[in-house]
Image (cartoon, rainbow, N blue to C red):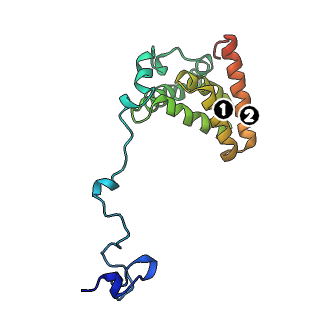
Amino acid sequence: MATSAEKGGWGRQGFLREDINAAGHVADAAPPCCFQGSPAAFAPQLPPPLSQRPGLAQDRGQRRRPPWQQPPSSRRDRLIPHFPKLVQMTNEVAYADVWERKAMGKRDRSLITVAALIALGREEQLATHLRRALGNGVTREEIAEVVTHMAIYAGWPAAMTGAQIACDVYEDIDSGKPAA
């Protein structure tokens, strides 16, 4: 008996001609060039457990108190009389829920947040989150890479502003000046 390739040869888009029915649709048979692996080969790849991801499990044990239990900043304090619900939601939703979710560590969240704040031009929030990123284990070199990356995707002025703010934060930290 002749093989498929010997009978018909190749048709449209690399399928054997016998695999294309009269209506021009590809039949259920997979072309011989396709991967014929087990269904497990196509399963989504999950990240390793938190305990096996570098820096996450160790960082969690070293934190004194979660951010929402730390004394609020003076800038947030001044909002309470006028925007109490906003401050409550910041503490309970942003910090107590989103930042504490287990699927991603604080270090990764900090990298994403810094990138987003640079891209959006949120200068006031950027300084706070740069300090938080450093506290969450992000290095100054990694922040430099985020800022440089944002030059391409968010624009040169956004990256240059982010770089200036990062330098201000570094100078404050190096001089021992407390966060605002």
Q: On the image, numbered disc 1 is attached to which residue?
A: 144
Q: Which mark is residue 161?
A: 2
**Image coordinates for residue 6, horizontal then vertical, percent:** 34, 85
Q: Which mark is residue 21?
A: none
What residue appears at the point 71 percent right and 45 percent down from the top-left corner?
155
- Residue 159 place in picture, x, y as percent: 71, 38
* Rendering quarter of residue 149: top right
Q: At 58% across and 20% down in the image, what residue appears?
A: 81
Q: Is residue 38 left or right of residue 71?
A: left
Direction top: furthest residue: 176
Of marks 2 and 1, the one in the foreground: 1
Determine whether 152 is above or below 99 in the image. Answer: below
Q: Position of residue 153 (x, y in %)?
A: 66, 46
Residue 69: percent from the left, percent from the top? 46, 17
Toward which corner of the image does residue 46 lie, by quadrant?
top left
Asked whether residue 21 is in view, the answer is no
Residue at the left extreme, as displayed: 1
Q: Nearer the viewer, residue 143 or 125?
A: 143
Q: Identify the residue at image location x=68%, y=31%.
A: 123
Q: Is residue 174 left or right of residue 111?
A: right
Label 1: how many Cα within 10 Å (few below 14, some 14–19, many 20+): some
Q: Secondary structure at mark 1?
A: helix
The residue at 66%/32% (across/down) is 144
* Residue 6 visible in image: yes
What quarter of the picture does the N terminus occupy? bottom left
SS at badge 2: helix
Q: Report the front residue among 13 and 165.
A: 13
Q: Which amino acid type is marked by label 2?
A: Thr
Image height of 145 relative to 21, above or below: above
Q: CA separation, marks 2 and 1?
A: 12 Å
Q: Give the class, few, some or many, for how many residues have Cα within 10 Å of label 2's Cα (few <14, many ≥20).
A: some
Along the viewing direction, whichever of 71 and 36 lies nearer the viewer: 36
